[in-house]
Amino acid sequence: MIIGIDLGTTNSLAAIWRDGRPQLIPNSLGEYLTPSVVSLDDDGTVLVGRAAQERLISHPQRTASCFKREIGTDKTYTLGGRTFTPEELSALVLRQLREDAEAWLGEPVTEAVVSVPAYFAQAQRAATKRAGALAGLLVERLVNEPSAAAVSARIGEGGVDKLCLVFDFGGGTLDVSLVERFENVVSVTAVSGDNRLGGRDFDMAIVRGFCDDCGLDYEALNQQQREMLLRQAESCKIALTAQRSVLMVYTDSEGGYHALPLTNEWLIRKSSPLFKRLTTPIRKVLVDSGTPAFAVDELVMVGGSSRMPAVRGYIAKSLGREISDGSQADTAVALGAGICAGMKARAEGLRELVLTDVCPFTLGISICNHNVPSQPVMSPIIERNSVLPTSKMGVYCTVRDNQTVLDVDVYQGENRYCKDNMLLGSLKISVPPAPKGQQSIQVRFTYDINGILEVEVLSEGDKTSRLLLKNDGVSDSEAQRRIEELAGLKLHPRDQERTRAISARGERLYAVTVGDLRRRIGEMLEWFGRQIESQEPMRVAKAARRITDFFDQVEAFTGEIDVSDPDDWESL
């Protein structure tokens, strides 16, 4: 059994595709939201979820939260004398979701599609897959959170064609994606985000603002007092979604009573730097995609923190657009992950649905910096926001006389200098000695939607060297199978039968027409061929609709004219 999981910074939840729709899976308490909190009891028992959350104030030294922000890093957490990594804590949350799902479904759950922030880097994605493995789950597929939300919206709205800006604002991260829904394709055009901006930051802004206005020294507070204030701040923030004002109250260790009325206007003043950061990813997505704000059909806001009236008003005003009322802020990503689980299982009703995603970061190799040789620069091969799967190639040559080795260092990132980007792997390629510039290699990157990157280097004498970079959780044999599938994708689009049928129809019409009409049909067939070669499902689907409409017009017209008179063809 395969389920979808929204592994969140604040809350996590699971869903499954069943009976032709996505369904949320309740936990042992009958709730859909499981707090992403882990605590170690005095007897060594691990508590996850609501029970652990209640211990944040009473046992702060034995409880951890918001560890998703640190996944993929070297940070550790010490709970009751035991040390945990962020992925180990995440694994405990995933295990709890798996056990709750098994109890509700009445059968074993062995596999999951897990959602991640669109702006997660390779290390963070790999750590998420390792967490799944530690939880006893096979996690081959990760889905970007805004993509999952867009899939959920498409199913809920019956597949209406729209260009959507998905603003996914959770407890710890912000993701922004431009997503196009067209026929049976959900295509991500561009992504951006901030992995260090979420509702938790607004909680902290409230705490610090409260301390400033009440004359409290936040730095002098102990961990328990800070957690108490954070819990109060979160409650007040939630209350402000429905109330104009709320009273925040705190009693200090000496019995001092502090109270302060909070409003959304006060929250905006105290959080102004955070609001400025909210729009940065939006601008980046629109610029990268070449899309003006007025071209967006729908603004979809998901994630628990997107419920904040101050945030909703700020984003709506920034884009000059009303917010869609159809999205389910807390559950949209989980429902989308459940749909993706159904897609992976080839469930009935989802077999024709296609989800394309994009590469969130640029991938390239290091090349010589002739101005400062000690600081190599990055040569991009796959640019950020390239539609996946993709395969692209670059040609590189020697830079020194009699050079016999070329280092192919693979990097991920947007910075000019390689030292500022992330090294993913390396290859050493031998070449015959020759004057500089006379020996060259071809470097091909092939990258799939599951995060598998194949680096192929073709050198002198058609010698091929290969490097396979894959997320943990994918076996070598499975990665090889995926790469073989990608080799086929380079040659043919997914919907091969449909495109062949359209091409055959065009060739038939070309054969029975003459003059200018025949020329126009030929031009349309050449244009359609170029769209097929792009390997982009959304582009192919749009082209198929356009050329089919054209052929329909041709056939409707030819049925009304005298086919024996060539002059009649010229009027179409």
Image (cartoon, rainbow, N blue to C red):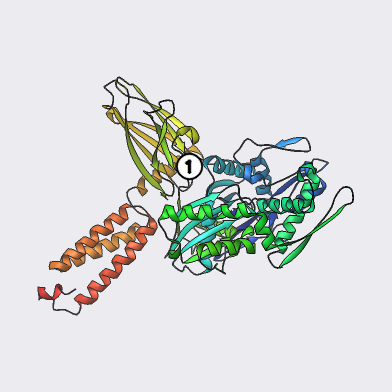
Q: Is residue 214 left or right of residue 459?
A: right
Residue 94 place in picture, x, y as percent: 65, 48
Name the image quarter holding residue 76.
Answer: top right
> As shown in the figure, which amino acid type bears the numbered disc 1?
Glu
Under tag 1, what secondary structure?
Answer: helix
Q: Is residue 223 left or right of residue 93?
A: right
Q: Is residue 451 visible?
A: yes
Q: Please, which residue is most extreme toward the bottom here?
A: 560
Name the image quarter holding residue 507.
Answer: bottom left
Q: Is residue 197 left or right of residue 425?
A: right
Residue 480 place in picture, x, y as percent: 44, 40
For this rendering, which residue is in front, 465 or 252? Answer: 252
Vertical relation: 209 (above or below) 417: below
Q: Is residue 198 left or right of residue 405?
A: right
Residue 17 place in picture, x, y as percent: 56, 61
Q: Residue at 76% of width from left, 51% of height from top? A: 211
Name the image quarter holding residue 185.
Answer: bottom left
Q: Is residue 29 visible?
A: no
Residue 434 place in picture, x, y as percent: 27, 21
Which residue, given by chain and number where applicable, does mark 1 sit on?
478
